[in-house]
C-alpha cells in the first residue's frame, strides 16, 4: 500500500526518533492543521518524538453539497447520529495502519506509537487503533465520536491501550454528547479510557494542550 503524503515534525531532528505520534486532521483541513502545535506542547527534547500529520484525500462530501474537499470519509447526514460511509472510514483506517507499519520499519516499536485524531480524524483513529494487531502506546480522541462502535471488530492486542477523550462543552459541530457516549461505550467494553471536558467550541484550548503534553510524556517515556 502506498502511504499517504504527510507533514513530519521531529522534536529533535538531529538524531533518530524514538517515538511517534500520528495525528489526523478534521474534515476540510489537511496535515498542516496541527503541525504548528508541536512547539506549543513543550515536550522534552530527550523524548525525541516524530509527529506525522497525514493528508486525507479529497473526495465529494454529501453534507457539503458534494463539494470536493479533504475528507477521511463521506458524511451523508449531519444529525446527532451521523450517517457516514463506513467503508471509506475503514479504508482510511487501513491507510493509517500502513503509516504505523512504516514507523515500525523505521525503527519505532509499536508500543511507542500513539494515534491521535481531531473530529472526523478521531473517528478514523478509533477504528485504526482498536483493530491494529500490535500494541500501541495510546489513542487520543479530540472533539470526535466513535463512528464504528456497532461494526468494529477489535483486536485483543490493544485491549489495554490508554485512551484519552477530550471534548468541548460548547462544541456546536460534534456535540459533546457524542464524546460522552464514546467514553461510556469504551468503558463498558473494559477499555482504559479517560474523559476530559473543556469550556471551548470545536477546537483546542491552552489548558487542553498542557494536558495533552502531560499525557504524551507519560505514554512515551
Image (cartoon, grey):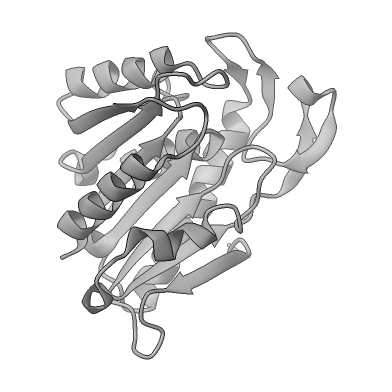
Query: Who's the residue at 61% across and 58% down the image?
Result: 32
Query: Who's the residue at 29% across and 49% down the image?
Result: 210
Expressed as whole percent of the image width and height from the top left, the position of residue 107 reads 32, 78
Q: 149 above or below 96?
A: above
Q: 39 above or below 69?
A: below
Quarter of the image holding residue 194? top left
Q: 137 above or below 206?
A: below
Query: Who's the residue at 30% across and 76% down the image?
Result: 48
Expressed as whole percent of the image width and height from the top left, the position of residue 92 reads 56, 44
Residue closest to the eye, 196 or 59: 196
Residue closest to the eye, 98 or 31: 31
Going by the image, does 106 lie left or right of 123?
A: left
Image quadrant occupied by the C terminus: bottom left
Image quadrant occupied by the N terminus: bottom right
Instruction: For residue 135, say whether it is visible.
Output: no
Query: Who's the residue at 50% across and 26% down the image?
Result: 201
Amino acid at each position: 500500500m502506498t502511504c499517504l503524503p504527510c507533514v513530519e515534525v521531529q522534536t529533535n531532528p538531529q538524531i533518530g526518533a524514538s517515538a511517534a505520534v500520528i495525528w489526523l486532521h478534521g474534515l476540510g483541513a489537511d496535515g498542516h492543521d496541527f503541525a504548528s502545535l508541536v512547539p506549543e506542547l513543550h515536550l522534552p527534547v530527550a523524548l525525541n518524538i516524530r509527529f506525522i500529520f497525514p493528508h486525507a484525500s479529497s473526495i465529494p462530501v454529501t453534507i457539503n453539497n458534494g463539494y470536493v474537499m479533504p475528507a477521511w470519509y463521506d458524511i451523508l447526514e449531519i444529525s446527532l447520529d451521523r450517517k457516514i460511509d463506513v467503508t471509506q472510514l475503514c479504508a482510511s483506517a487501513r491507510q493509517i495502519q500502513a503509516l504505523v507499519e512504516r514507523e515500525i520499519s523505521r525503527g519505532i516499536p509499536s508500543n511507542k506509537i500513539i494515534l491521535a485524531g481531531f473530529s472526523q480524524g478521531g473517528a478514523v483513529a478509533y477504528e485504526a487503533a482498536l483493530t491494529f494487531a500490535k500494541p500501541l502506546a495510546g489513542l487520543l480522541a479530540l472533539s470526535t465520536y466513535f463512528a464504528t462502535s456497532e461494526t468494529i471488530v477489535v483486536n485483543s492486542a490493544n485491549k489495554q491501550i490508554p485512551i484519552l477523550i477530550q471534548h468541548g462543552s460548547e462544541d456546536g459541530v460534534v456535540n459533546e454528547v457524542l464524546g460522552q457516549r464514546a467514553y461510556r461505550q469504551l468503558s463498558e467494553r473494559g477499555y482504559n479510557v479517560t474523559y476530559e471536558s473543556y469550556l471551548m467550541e470545536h477546537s483546542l484550548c491552552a489548558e487542553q494542550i498542557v494536558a495533552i503534553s502531560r499525557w504524551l510524556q507519560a505514554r512515551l517515556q
